[in-house]
Amino acid sequence: MTDAILVVNAGSSSVKVELFAADDALASLLSGQIEAIGLAPRLHLRDAAGATVADEAWPQGEGPRDHRAALAAIGAAVARAAGQRRIVAVGHRVVHGGAALAAPVVIDPAIRAELAALTPLAPLHQPHNLAGIDAMADLHPGVMQVACFDTAFHRGHPRVADTFALPRAFYQRGIRRYGFHGLSYAYIAMRLAAVAPALAGGRVVVAHLGNGASMCAIRDGRSIDSTMGFTALDGLPMGTRSGQIDPGVLLHLLTTEGYDAAALTRLLYHDSGLKGLSGLSSDMRALEQARTAEATEAIGYFVYRIRKELGALAAALGGLDGLVFTAGIGENSAAVRAAVCTGMDWLGIALDDQANARGETVISAPGSRVQVLRLPTDEERMIAIETLRLLLR
Ligand code: ADP
């Protein structure tokens, strides 16, 4: 029987899983997800060659109804598909580690309680992450479980990047700029050491552009600032999230337009960003194909904000040596990468249009002072790496 590490990423409407061989190479054995939890759930697992090993779909209102049931269903499907492989550890993506948890940790009752206490800081995500931990403890009693945090990579921010200009007591109460997408940034920082060693010790901005989008300023492999703050709402506009907004707008909506907290939450998390601006879709691919004036404007806004944040983060770093594009849009949209880099020669960026169109790893021109890269991210693998590290400790 060979040993395996299960990685669980329990999000708001889906649970993603991946099984890795528990040795240094961490070969991926199985991956999949259960989607549309609470609507019309669909479970799909594939092996390393991409062949389907489990595929189930339930009509509206049937099948696993909530996260607990969905986790049990996908946990059981993985256990069946794992065959002779014994799961020796489970690594979880946990959105919030608060101010104290700056590295992955083995989950024990005290840590479980600490994570639950952080729920008010991430009410839309932390409860699902906790449900994942509880479900896997039920399915695999006694097996080591590890929490890996989206916030941890940012915990070394200087205080000036970590605070708001509120009265000092708010900082002590945890009202801070935590930053997110840290597992993706940690993975990219690790990959830089392999593919661009000169950048690994330099000043780099990473643009994680997916449904959720943020940017991170990295110096010597460590995060010094990020566009996301107290929540994953700040910074860049996203698929359905507004990104940065004048807080006065929120006060106005609350005081004169009859909004309450629930209506604001819906507006800022679900109805804004690319979806709100385009009136069409949250999906970049759909917008690029649509070519309507509104879709073009939404993409233009997205690009404009990335360019502004690039300038701001370069200033925070005191200059720029590298720019990395990653995640769904960053990895796949040559048009967005080109639009971000066009006219950025003042910052030392010169794109190689052909290399960009082909989606090569290095997409800057040979003489470009700033090296521009396209690197696929892999948050699940990062969790597996950290989980193995703690398993072997
Ligand atoms: P998540 O944050 O949910 O993990 P992803 O990193 O998968 O999201 O990114 C999803 C985004 O990537 C969507 O907007 C999608 O349209 C976009 N995307 C994926 N493939 C392409 C493509 N070939 N061209 C343009 N956009 C793409």
Image (cartoon, helix red, strand yellow):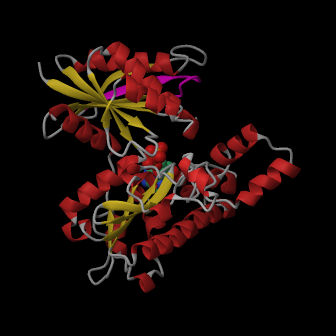
Q: Which quadrant is home to the N terminus?
A: top left
Task: Tell me if residue 156 comes above or below residue 122 in the rendering.
Answer: below
User: Residue 365, located in which quarter of the rendered image?
Assistant: bottom left
Q: Which residues are magenta?
A: 35-47
Q: Residue at x 13, y 35 (%)?
A: 23
Q: Residue at x 39, y 36 (%)?
A: 93
Does 40 appear in magenta? Answer: yes
Task: Tell me if residue 237 comes above or below residue 370 in the rendering.
Answer: above
User: Residue 107, located in which quarter of the rendered image?
Assistant: top left
Residue 281 x, y percent position in the rendering: 62, 49
Q: Which quadrant is home to the C terminus?
A: top left
**Closest to the observer, 379 or 59:** 379
Task: Tell me if residue 66 comes above or below residue 286 in the rendering.
Answer: above
Q: Residue at x 75, y 53 (%)?
A: 250
Q: Residue at x 25, y 55 (%)?
A: 190
Image side of residue 323 versus residue 50, left or right: right
Residue 354 x, y percent position in the rendering: 34, 73
* Residue situated furthest right in the rendering: 256
Image side of residue 364 versus residue 171, left or right: left
Task: Tell me if residue 193 comes above or below residue 315 in the rendering.
Answer: above
